[in-house]
Image (tube, rainbow, N blue to C red):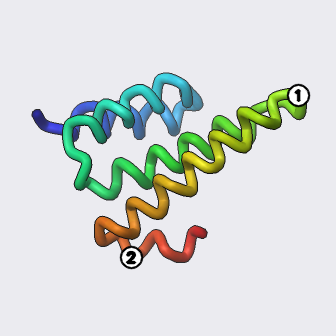
């Protein structure tokens, strides 16, 4: 199945501040095509935005979300997205 509809929707949701919904769509895009590095990049950005909005009491969850973002960026680089190397 084509990953572009959930990818595009996820990017739009991310840029309108609806990060939880964006994350779900980006997960769907990756489920449809796990070799599309841009999906991993945008999911990492979404995860970082989610983490940035968390309260100090949510620190354990925040660290988990940040580790997920780091893994997504690493996967984007592995898939050939060399332009993402400067981000981490």
Residue identified by numbered label 2? 82
Q: Residue at x 37, y 34 (%)?
A: 27
**Rendered view: 67 above or below 27:** below
Determine whether, in the image, residue 18 is placed left or right of residue 65: left
12 to 41, vertically: above or below: above
Q: Is residue 83 left or right of residue 30?
A: right
Name which quarter of the figure residue 56 lies in.
Answer: top right
Q: Residues within 10 Å of mark 2 (few under 14, many from 20)?
A: few
Quickly name the residue at label 1.
Answer: 57
| Residue 43: percent from left, percent from top | 46, 44
**Tag 2–tag 1 contact (CB < 8 Å):** no
Quarter of the image for the N terminus: give it. Answer: top left
Residue at 26% x, 36% y: name it. 31
Q: Secondary structure at mark 1?
A: helix
- Please name the residue shown 30% across and 41% down the image: 30
**Residue 64 placed where, x, y %?**
66, 40
Of tags 2 and 1, which is closer to the observer? 1
For the residue pair 1 and 71, the one nearer the viewer reads as 71
């Amino acid at each position: 199945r084509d990953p572009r509809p959930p990818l595009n929707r996820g990017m739009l949701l991310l840029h309108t501040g609806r990060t939880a919904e964006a994350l779900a769509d980006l997960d769907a895009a990756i489920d449809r095509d796990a070799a599309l590095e841009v999906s991993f990049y945008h999911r990492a950005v979404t995860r970082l935005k989610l983490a940035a909005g968390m309260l100090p009491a949510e620190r354990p969850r925040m660290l988990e979300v940040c580790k997920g973002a780091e893994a997504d960026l690493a996967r984007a680089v592995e898939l050939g997205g060399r332009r993402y190397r400067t981000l981490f």
